[in-house]
Amino acid sequence: MAPPAPSSGRDASLLSPSHYDDDASSLHSERSDQETDSEDDEVLLGARTSADIRAHDRNVLLEEEERDKLLEDSRRRGRRGSALAAMRNPLKGLGLFSKSYAELPMVEAESGSGSGAGKEMLEVRNSEKDVKRKRRRERRREKKRRLLGEAERGEDGQLMYEMEEGGLKEGSITGASSETEGSDEIDRRGLRGLHDDKVKRRRSWRRWCFIHLLIAVGFSILVLGAWKLSLHRKSAIPVQAMLSNGSALFAPTTVLISLDGFRADFLKWGITPRLNAFIEEGVSPIYMNPSFPSVTFPNHYTLVTGLYPESHGVVGNTFWDADLKEEFFYTNPNAMQPKWWGGEPLWVTAENQGIRTAIHMWPGSEAHIMEVEPAFLDKYNGQEPLSNKVSRILELLDKPGLENQLAEVVSMRPQLIAAYVPNVDSDGHRYGPNSTEIRVTINDVDTMLDHLFQGLEARNLTDIVNVVVVSDHGMATTDISRLIQLEDLIDTSLIEHTDGWPLYGLRPKNPADLHPLYDTLLKKTASNPGFDVYLRDKTMPERYHFSKNERIAPLWIVPKTGWAIVTKEEFNVAEGLEHGLIYSPRGLHGYDHEHPLMRAIFVARGPAFPHAPNSRVEPFQNIEVYNIICDSLHIVPKPNNGTIRLPFNVVGVHTPDTALEEPNDPEPSPSQAASPASDVATSATSPSTPSSSAQDSSSPSTIPESAPDAVISISPIEASSAADPEELSPALVGVDPPEPEPTRPVVSDESEMTPEEKSFWEWFKSRLDKVKGWFGELVKGEEDAEKQGKSV
């Protein structure tokens, strides 16, 4: 009998029982839908590899052989065979199967008569089904566990990867590879390599994301910082209230005027009526202390920076910079380079905050500091008349402001005007602070201020514009009896550089000589009371604030107030005493900044100072002026050494009881006053003013006839060791050059006048003031008429 035709579909495989056994379908038909082999096969086929398929086929063959064996045994136990049973299975000869499933229907037919053998065979079949079901269930569980384990180890992922890449790779666990242990190891290595590649790609991706995230965060921080800075810059320029004088709008405006060398007690001499009236209108201390050393350039720069000289770096009118290997000399054009000037001056602070400035001859204003220039800059001119300064200030105030929308920015009105007036200092050096000549100069400066205030009043700006008048230091009278010869103190051949004047900063050639020089000088202070000696880093007084800068020399000889230290090249003290010479300059400063003769002034009035008239505040140091001016302009000051802010803490008003006592000039040296030469030098000294005769007495009777050229004039410029005698004097910046003494009216000192002389002098001055006033009004009227004619 021929075998039945193979069924179509998945059972068409040669390995499928339905291909060669008709009873296979009947065996499977008795199962439920959930227990059919086809469904099991479908489940298994959905998630098995080629190796699993081969193993499954082997299991199927083994099961079929076992089943055939059981059937054969059952036949032998008593069942009669049919004609078909005697026939050989043609497929068996092919060696494919040991028993043919085609015999099973025949067996069933033979046993259908209800024989015992048929029943036994059915029982065997049922038992076989149960066994097979259990085995299949066990195989499925085992396979499920195995598949789960392989998935955890990555083998299932490898299968998916290979399929996605376009095929199975030879030698992998999913292909028809060798089943040897070497092949498995190669597969595992491949899997590990692929896994490592994935990890690397994952790490690379994370690193890429991290780097780009950092870049994005950094860029965001920069943008945020720029935005914050822009907000801060805008907030640093607050909206300023505008005041009207009837014809124009004025933002906060301040005029700062410095009277160089104007000592505080000059206000007590009765020759400054306008300044005294200004004090009664405004607010002021009875004096203001300068900073140490009390010389022009360091203090003027302190006024506009709020920094001690040790902080802003301009530590003297002359000094050596060891780093730059250069010397700062205040009259040299090289001094007007920004490398010397630290800190931020007022005009830079204001310009950076949108406030226009005008600087008139202020020391340091030509140095291009921080590459910020004032809107208006007037270079130094020591010969400028005082009246020109008034005209210049009023001219700046007359410029158009914010109310004029058609005005060009370059020509708009400044809100800060700072003017420098050197006259009192120049004549104080030339004639001495107690001379009649200086009194005339002081009165001239007072008249200049009066004209300025009149101009402000004429423009209705008295209550609109702030006016602040200051000075940088005082002045002390010199005397030949208070001179110290430097060569008598130390061996000058050991010194490489000397700084400052009249005090001396010493820089030894050999640093090892520093302490021996200090010890030598310290011993000589016991016998000479005219000076003190300090080591910058050890013994310098803390109140000087004069140690924390390398531009400050390591060793200092600081003369007492009224004393001076000179070299023999500058002035031979022994010869001067012998011949009765008069030492010049006749007035000096640069001493202890807290000495009464070094005291300066501060007076303010205007809308930024809403205090009662004649208000008095406690004395303060000039480091406070920077903050005060910034507050008056409503701008933000840079960090500085000052602490006072507006409004002032007023402590009362000025009264005669709170008036400043007039300081006395230093006494002549007792040791030198006893010498004959000293007697000649001081013979004209009056008892009331023991030290003023050496400066004030210009009578020939005080000078021996044998010495017609006995007056030797030595200026601070010529006295400096830095000056090259063969080099032409440079253009002076901030200080007048030495000039021959002009012919000036000699007016007797009021303290030496008789009552009749004083009465005549008062009458003469009143007449002179009236003439000046009449002449000023005449000139002003002509100028006004000329302006009106031009306007027409």
Image (cartoon, rainbow, N blue to C red):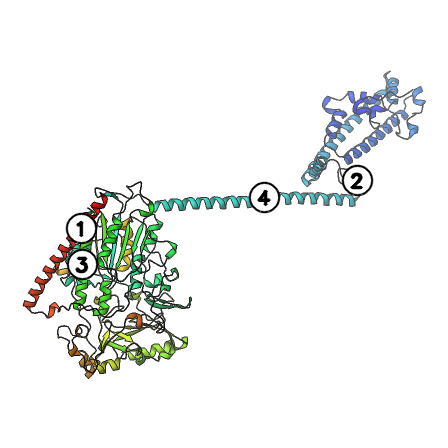
Residue 371 % position (x, y) = 39, 55
What residue is pinned by disc 1? 782
Return the x and y of residue 183 as percentages of the image width and height: 78, 44
In primary-sequence order, the first of circles 3 and 4 is: 4
Q: Earlier in the sequence, mark 1 or mark 2?
A: 2
Nearest to viewer (mark 1 / mark 3)? 1
Element type at marker 4? helix
**Disc number for residue 177:** 2
Is the C-beta separation of discs 4 and 2 under 8 Å? Answer: no
Residue type indicated by callout 1 = Glu
Which secondary structure, mark 1? Answer: helix
Quadrant of residue 623 within the rendered picture:
bottom left
Q: Distance between the Cα atoms at labels 1 and 2?
A: 121 Å
- Residue at 20 percent across and 60 percent down: it is 445
543 displayed left or right of 228: left
In the image, farthest residue toward the left: 756
Q: Is residue 112 above or below residue 236?
A: above
Q: CA distance from mark 2 to mark 3?
A: 115 Å
- Residue picked out by circle 3: 446
The N terminus sits in image quarter: top right
Q: Residues under labels 3 and 4: Cα distance?
A: 79 Å
Q: Secondary structure at mark 3?
A: helix
Locate residue 316: give its quadrant: bottom left
- Decide: few, some or many residues near mark 3? Use Cα within 10 Å; few <14, some 14-19, many ≥20: some
Using the numbered discs, state the Cα–Cα distance from disc 1 to disc 4 in whole angstroms: 86 Å
Quadrant for the C terminus in the image: top left
Q: Tell me, for residue 206, which label it has, or none.
A: 4
Q: What's the distance in space between the residues labelled 4 and 2, CA to CA?
A: 36 Å
